[in-house]
Amino acid sequence: MSSSVITTERLILRTWTEADRAPFSALSRDPEVMALVTPHPDRAASEAWIDRQVAAQSSDGFCFWAVEHSGSFVGAVGLLRVRYPAHFTPAIEVGWRIARASWGRGFAPEAAGAALRFGFTTLAVPEIVANTIATNARSLRVMAKIGMTRNPADDFDHPLVPDGDPLRRQVLYRITREHWAALFKAVPGRNTCSVNGWRKPDPVPHGGPSCPGC
């Protein structure tokens, strides 16, 4: 049985179930979804990845959760401890992987923004990071939408990716709790934007210019 961890206007971020394994395996073998990240070559690799999320949830209280929309699995989004050595570690990262059929609907920033809110308000972590390669335009847009920023001096070679691999050089984005609070702090009596939990004045539609995350 799954347990809901976070709910947004449209999504549920929850713990993993056996029923999630097949759709996650299909997602992780989609060449378009995995083109700019380390692929899962087979079902066993996807199963092992889910098992690591279950273990992280048990030990840390957070992981890359399964994401559900209208009763259907649409991807994985959440927080993880960075386990490899780098100049910015120890750190907590936010990440996402959305099924291609659900692209273009704003699910990644909606879920990732909610994960940031969980990290800063429930876990009280001081900073959250994200990384990808410089040509991953979709992920870079998500990072910007949820308020993260990049300093090129932070870019790094991923220690778990071999020399010569195009995925080795990574750009790093960060957001501190203070910066997040300044951008997205809730204001009592206002409607809530689905991204980051930021609250906007009633006349402003979702995605309007007054919402810094949309």
Image (cartoon, grey):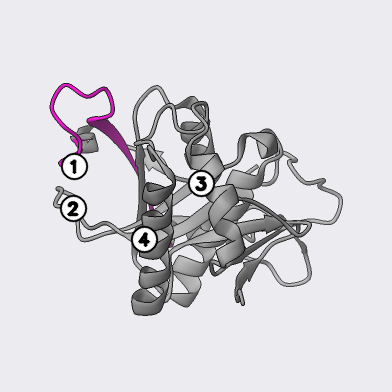
Task: Locate residue 94 relative to residue 111 in the image: left or right.
Answer: left
Q: Do the residues bearing badges 4 and 1 touch, measured as CB atoms within 8 Å? A: no
Q: Which residue is mark 2?
A: 84
Q: Which residue is mark 3?
A: 25
Q: Do the residues bearing badges 1 and 3 touch, measured as CB atoms within 8 Å? A: no
Q: Which residue is mark 1?
A: 160
Q: Which residues are magenta?
A: 157-177
- For the residue marked with disc 3, what is the amino acid? Ser
Q: Is residue 180 magenta?
A: no
- From the viewer's side, name the closer residue of 50 and 93: 50
Mark 3 is surrounded, within 10 Å at the Cα level, by few (under 14), some (14 to 19) or many (20 or more) other residues, namely many
Mark 2 is surrounded, within 10 Å at the Cα level, by few (under 14), some (14 to 19) or many (20 or more) other residues, namely few
Q: Position of residue 187 (x, y in %)?
A: 68, 67
Q: Separation of disc 2 and disc 1 at Cα?
A: 7 Å
Q: Do the residues bearing badges 2 and 1 touch, measured as CB atoms within 8 Å? A: yes
Determine the residue positioned at 53% across, 53% down.
76
- For the residue marked with disc 1, what is the amino acid? Leu
Q: Separation of disc 1 and disc 3 at Cα?
A: 22 Å
Q: Going from the N terminus, do you reach mark 4 or mark 1 first? A: 4
Q: Going from the N terminus, do you reach mark 1 or mark 3 first? A: 3
- From the viewer's side, name the closer residue of 67 and 49: 49
Q: Residue 168, relative to residue 159: is it above or below?
A: above
Q: How many marks?
A: 4
- For the residue marked with disc 4, what is the amino acid? Leu
Determine the residue positioned at 72% across, 72% down.
188
